Amino acid sequence: MSLVDFKILQTAWTYSRADFAAVSATILVTLVIGVEAGVSAGVMLSILLYLWRSSRPHIAEVGLVPGTQHFRNILRHKVETTPSVLTLRIDESLWFANARYLEDYLLNRLAGDLDIRHVVLMCSAVNEVDLSAVESLEAINQRLKDQTITLHLSEVKGPVEDRLKRSSFLNHLTGSIYLSQYDAWKALTPKKDRNSLNHLNQKKKQSRSLKI
């Protein structure tokens, strides 16, 4: 009992339910069986929880923050979006455990939305793409092509792009790889939409200046 810090349970519960489960299992097994078994149980549970979390990566639909070149989650910030362009930011490396999840997520998002002509996968948080994920990307590319939708990538890290070049995926990619998401937005957003957004931004600035 002297080895157990019960205060950590409250902290873990507040911070993360998954961490609370790992800490609780470690403490429980330690008290019932012993220290070595408790530590081993905690490590094993942490690995399983990591695999579960990474198999369901956070995917955010992002838009342009007005007056900047930054893109943020449309559910958290007031951003500008274009009906014909869908941008998804993937916050996890792509591998066999989550490749199908991305494919299902994207196809569900596109269902019923007939305005989308371009899909951009923002890969700023992707550090690795394994072979299974490449196969899923190829499947996504082909299914989008069948729907006359072009697939693009943006902010792909050098080592990831080097690995992709070893496959045939980039040869069949219907769209382009953009250095930044802002470059993709400028290239893919119709000029009429950009003009309307610029006009809206000017009205917002005038409104702010009048208030000041």
Image (spheres, grey):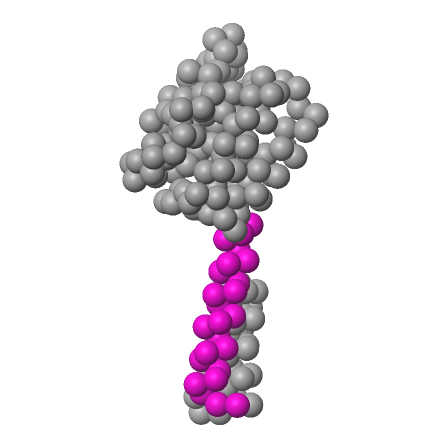
Q: Is residue 10 above or below residue 17?
A: below
Q: Nearer the viewer, residue 142 or 149?
A: 142
Q: Identify which residue is drawn at 51% across, 82% down.
A: 27
Residue 131: percent from left, percent from top: 44, 43
| Picture coordinates of residue 148, whole percent (x, y) | 58, 17
Question: What residue appears at the point 50 percent right and 11 percent down from the top-left corner?
Answer: 190
* Residue 209 visible in this rendered orientation of the protein: no
- Quarter holding residue 123: top left
Q: Can residue 21 be seen in this view?
A: yes
Residue 25 location (% of width, % of height): 55, 77
Residue 167 in picture, x, y percent from top left: 38, 34
- Which is nearer the eye, 128 or 64? 128
Magenta-colored stretch includes residue 193: no
Direction from residue 188 to residue 147 in the image, left or right: right
Q: Can you tell which quarter of the image residue 181 is in? A: top left
| Magenta stretch, overall SS | helix
Q: Is residue 67 left or right of residue 108?
A: left
Instruction: State the residue at coordinates (38%, 21%).
Output: 183
Q: How many marks?
A: 0
**Image quarter in which the C terminus is found:** top left
Q: Which of 97 and 5 is in front in this view?
A: 97
In reply to whether residue 54 is colored magenta, the answer given is yes
Q: Residue 208, relative to residue 191: is it above or below? A: below
Q: Give the range drawn in magenta.
A: 33-56
Task: Please determine whether, in this image, residue 94 is positioned above or below residue 23.
Answer: above
Residue in the picture at 51% in, 20% down: 150
95, above or below 34, in the image: above
